Image (spheres, coloured by chain):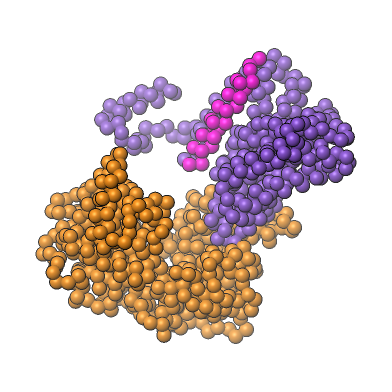
Chain colours: A orange, B purple
């Protein structure tokens, strides 16, 4: 904490959130979120995936309107129909993803989207204002006329925060600002946050990194299933207590006993896999027939393992062997040819061909096998479509429809099924295999993955959802900051995983 | 329809005092009103048909032949451009220059014999264009910028090579390309052959189907391990072959090649592809549609010519036609209308 000189006034209230609720298509994402933030307070907002944090953040920053409940700022109830409206009332949001424009200078970025900026910029006044804000954050070394490209990722995050402050904010919401930062960079961001809070600004800090939350925040509100569990002073909390609040009853591994590796099965051997700035020295021997789960939040490196193997990280280094052949994993075409199939965590932009039919998507990656000499045979194509659709439980009547028309669950089934039922796929890699999928769809996809493993494939998936990790993973590897934290062979429970993912333990 | 629409709108304005409110009233819209493609087709084709049949000498065999013949040169190139547009590389702006160079090469190599000259010309067109495709496919070069540069380079090469004077052939074996078969010039048969070949390639081969996938979502194709670079190069190579065929016919028809031989081929080909309804963003379209587009432009030019309008008028109408279809296709893709 920033020293006793500027204790936040916790007895006063600057932001009051009361009984906030919001549903999507009848499914409640937030049921009853309530908390207050005082002027100068840094307030942590924690919760497991799907607890409703980001929905609350979106309602506070004007991106979503609540179905029920009230938001009051400075004692006045407010309506926030848009981001601009929120900005006008002094609410600034620093997003998970960086939104600085690399081609512009620091100063230009700070003025972007500023509703108070004059139509005709007066260079000198603008520059002086930026200088003042940067100095106020302890960023004396950054010049307003410096191009953003010359800054490191941590400094860009700082510029982003500076930009939020330049909007004369009374409330600054930081949504996972440190997920992709190194410790040194995070320390700078924290120092800046403390300085900002010292000016009387209310800070709402959303993070998965629980030890950071406890270090930085004055109080912590935990959400579970869309409702506030408790708001507690940070000094009275430990990481373990926080995890208990977040999970309620901790999920344990059910009867699903980890499968022993069959001796004659082949393996995917990964040695010393590294991606600069993202992943350090990852080792794994993944046996065919088992499901290996990578547990890690955004920035943990879990999804980078899969992307590197699929050939999507050209700068990756290390040794990868599949069935004792070296995989040229820096080239996606070669990786696919050697039997690696990858299901990305974003089926819309990096997965399906949304305007193409379901059938067309199911055969998209296996066209070379549906003919001879590059010429397709329509009969074989139809047979393939029918058998995959059958395998994946896709409605036979909708195969001619564009994938876009399907539900999220069925879209994801198409995405996964595209990799199944082929003898040229040896390893199946999935990043968040059930993101945005309803419960029925999840069960179906989990079944598909288990069947794929039983059929003799290497299956590796990355996920942040405890139930999914515990249910599917024969081996679970927890990751944080690009490193492996621990490996579990069928003896994991939810709170241990959560602790590894959010708190971090030295590699054992 | 228009007046009903207008009065409904003003009524809506009266009840909603805030005219800036953009929210459409869901009940106010007619169920299933015809989409812009349907409207555009009717608006364009109906008057055209009326105009055409009422035009003197339009409905004659000779005129039909003339329409086909005038569609052929541009059509052959446009079929190739269709593949490039489908694969997501938008357009090439180096077509005229490439056709000119191919024509010159074809005429200069006549002394080798007709077949070798044809082969050399084809290889020339394919290589020149496929190299640009490789830069787009493997290195993500911007096709517009790249082909502007390539157009200058190729055009300059043509000027340098010819010294700015017309290139004349060493023999006249090429006149065989000016022959007619069953009353139609060979170029018309070439157009049909290229269309059939392109259609088969797009629909019945692995590479062709992958062109649609790469064009619709390049990131997804890459993540799936599809050969994005190779497929792109193949589309461009086919395009190069088509340009070369056009170049050969152009050279034969003119019996000499000047640096301006390619003329407005670049934009004419793009217009034919767009009028056919192929999406400039990639992922949709077909060779048959482009054939239709080329024929439609040809019919319109023919009608205007028969009615005695100037060249300026013909170009103006062509421009408006492209504009209308492009807007209609855009609305269809972005709003899901049909």
- Left or right placement of residue B221 versus residue B174 in this view: left
Q: Which residues are magenta?
A: B308-334
**Nearer the observer, A143 or A152:** A143
| Residue A28 can be seen, yes or no | no
Quadrant for residue A469, please give it. Answer: bottom left
Residue A64 is situated, as x and y percent measured from the top left of the image, at 30, 51
Residue A371 is situated, as x and y percent measured from the top left of the image, at 71, 58
- Left or right placement of residue B252 versus residue A261 in this view: right
Residue A450 is situated, as x and y percent measured from the top left of the image, at 52, 73
Q: Residue furthest left?
A: A11
**Nearer the observer, B64 or B157:** B157
* Residue ID at (18%, 63%): A198
- Left or right placement of residue B48 versus residue B250 in this view: left
* Residue ID at (53%, 30%): B324
| Residue B326 counted in the magenta span | yes
The main secondary structure of the magenta stretch is helix
Residue A439 is situated, as x and y percent measured from the top left of the image, at 41, 64
**Nearer the observer, A394 or A2:** A2
**Nearer the observer, A228 or B265:** B265
Looking at the image, residue A358 lies above or below residue B239 = below
Quadrant for residue A165, please give it. Answer: bottom left
- Left or right placement of residue A235 versus residue B95 in this view: left
Number of labels in the image equals 0
Looking at the image, residue B112 lies above or below residue B66 = below
Looking at the image, residue A421 lies above or below residue B73 = below
Quadrant that contains the N terminus of chain B: top left
| Residue B218 can be seen, yes or no | yes
Looking at the image, residue A436 lies above or below residue A216 = above
* Residue ID at (60%, 67%): A335
| Residue A416 counted in the magenta span | no
* Residue ID at (15%, 57%): A14
């Amino acid at each position: 904490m920033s020293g006793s000189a500027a204790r936040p006034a916790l007895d006063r209230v600057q932001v009051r959130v009361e009984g906030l609720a919001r549903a999507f298509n009848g499914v409640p994402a937030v049921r009853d979120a309530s908390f207050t933030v005082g002027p100068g307070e840094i307030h942590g907002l924690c919760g497991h995936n799907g607890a409703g944090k980001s929905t609350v953040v979106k309602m506070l920053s004007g991106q979503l309107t609540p179905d029920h409940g009230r938001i009051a700022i400075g004692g006045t109830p407010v309506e926030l129909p848009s981001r601009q409206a929120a900005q006008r009332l002094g609410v600034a949001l620093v997003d998970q993803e960086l939104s600085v424009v690399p081609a512009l200078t620091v100063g230009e970025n700070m003025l972007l989207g500023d509703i108070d900026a004059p139509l005709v910029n007066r260079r000198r006044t603008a520059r002086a204002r930026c200088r003042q804000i940067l100095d106020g954050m302890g960023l004396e070394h950054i010049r307003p006329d410096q191009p953003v490209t010359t800054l490191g990722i941590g400094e860009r995050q700082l510029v982003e925060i500076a930009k939020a402050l330049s909007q004369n904010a009374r409330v600054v919401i930081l949504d996972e600002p440190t997920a992709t930062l190194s410790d040194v960079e995070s320390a700078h961001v924290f120092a800046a946050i403390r300085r900002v809070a010292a000016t009387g600004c209310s800070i709402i800090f959303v993070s998965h990194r629980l030890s950071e939350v406890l270090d930085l925040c004055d109080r912590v509100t935990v959400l579970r299933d869309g409702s506030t569990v408790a708001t507690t002073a940070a000094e009275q909390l430990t990481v373990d207590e926080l995890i208990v609040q977040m999970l309620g009853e901790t999920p344990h591994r059910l009867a699903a006993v980890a499968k022993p590796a069959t001796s004659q099965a082949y393996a995917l051997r990964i040695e010393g896999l590294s991606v600069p700035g993202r992943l350090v020295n990852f080792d794994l021997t993944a046996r065919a027939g088992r499901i290996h789960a990578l547990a890690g939040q955004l920035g943990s490196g879990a999804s980078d393992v899969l992307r590197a193997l699929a050939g999507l990280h050209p700068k990756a280094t290390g040794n990868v062997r599949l069935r004792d052949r070296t995989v040229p994993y820096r080239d996606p075409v070669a990786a696919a040819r050697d039997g690696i199939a990858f299901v990305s965590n974003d089926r819309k932009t990096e997965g399906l061909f949304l305007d193409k039919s379901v059938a067309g998507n199911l055969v998209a990656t296996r066209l070379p096998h549906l003919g001879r000499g590059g010429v397709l045979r329509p009969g074989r194509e139809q047979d393939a479509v029918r058998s995959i659709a059958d395998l994946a439980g896709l409605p036979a009547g909708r195969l001619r429809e564009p994938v876009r028309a399907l539900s999220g669950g069925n879209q994801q089934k198409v995405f996964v099924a595209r990799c199944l039922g082929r003898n040229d796929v040896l390893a199946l890699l999935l990043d968040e295999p059930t993101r945005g999928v309803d419960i029925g769809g999840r069960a179906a996809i989990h079944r598909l993955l288990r069947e794929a493993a039983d059929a003799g494939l290497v299956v590796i998936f990355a996920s942040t959802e405890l139930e999914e990790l515990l249910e599917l993973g024969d081996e679970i590897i927890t990751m944080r900051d690009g490193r492996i934290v621990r490996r579990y062979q069928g003896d994991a429970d939810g709170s241990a995983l959560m602790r590894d993912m959010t708190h971090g333990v030295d590699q054992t | 329809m228009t007046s009903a629409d207008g009065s409904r709108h003003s009524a809506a304005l009266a009840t909603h005092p805030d005219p800036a409110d953009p929210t459409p009233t869901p009940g106010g819209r007619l169920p299933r009103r015809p989409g812009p493609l349907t409207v555009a087709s009717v608006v364009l084709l109906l008057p055209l048909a009326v105009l055409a049949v009422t035009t003197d000498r339009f409905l004659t065999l000779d005129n039909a032949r003339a329409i086909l013949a005038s569609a052929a040169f541009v059509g052959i190139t446009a079929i190739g451009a269709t593949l490039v547009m489908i694969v997501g590389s938008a357009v090439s702006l180096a077509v005229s220059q490439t056709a000119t160079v191919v024509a010159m090469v074809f005429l200069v190599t006549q002394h080798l014999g007709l077949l070798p000259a044809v082969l050399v010309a084809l290889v020339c067109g394919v290589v020149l264009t496929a190299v640009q495709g490789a830069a787009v496919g493997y290195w993500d070069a911007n096709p517009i910028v790249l082909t502007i540069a390539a157009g200058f380079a190729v055009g300059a090469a043509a000027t340098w090579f010819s010294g700015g004077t017309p290139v004349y052939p060493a023999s006249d074996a090429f006149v065989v390309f000016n022959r007619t078969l069953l009353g139609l010039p060979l170029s018309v048969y070439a157009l049909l052959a290229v269309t059939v070949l392109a259609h088969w390639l797009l629909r019945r081969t692995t590479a062709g189907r992958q062109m649609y996938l790469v064009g619709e979502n390049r990131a997804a194709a890459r993540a799936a391990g599809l050969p994005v670079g190779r497929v792109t190069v193949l589309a461009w190579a086919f395009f190069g072959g088509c340009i070369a065929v056009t170049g050969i016919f152009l050279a034969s028809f003119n019996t000499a090649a000047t640096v301006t031989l390619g003329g407005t081929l670049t934009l004419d080909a793009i217009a034919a592809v767009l009028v056919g309804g192929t999406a400039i963003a990639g992922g949709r379209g077909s060779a048959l549609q482009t054939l239709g587009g080329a024929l439609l432009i040809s019919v319109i030019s023919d009608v205007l010519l028969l009615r005695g309008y100037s060249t300026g008028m013909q170009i103006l109408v062509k421009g408006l036609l492209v504009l209308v279809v492009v807007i209609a296709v855009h609305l269809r893709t972005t709003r899901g209308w049909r």
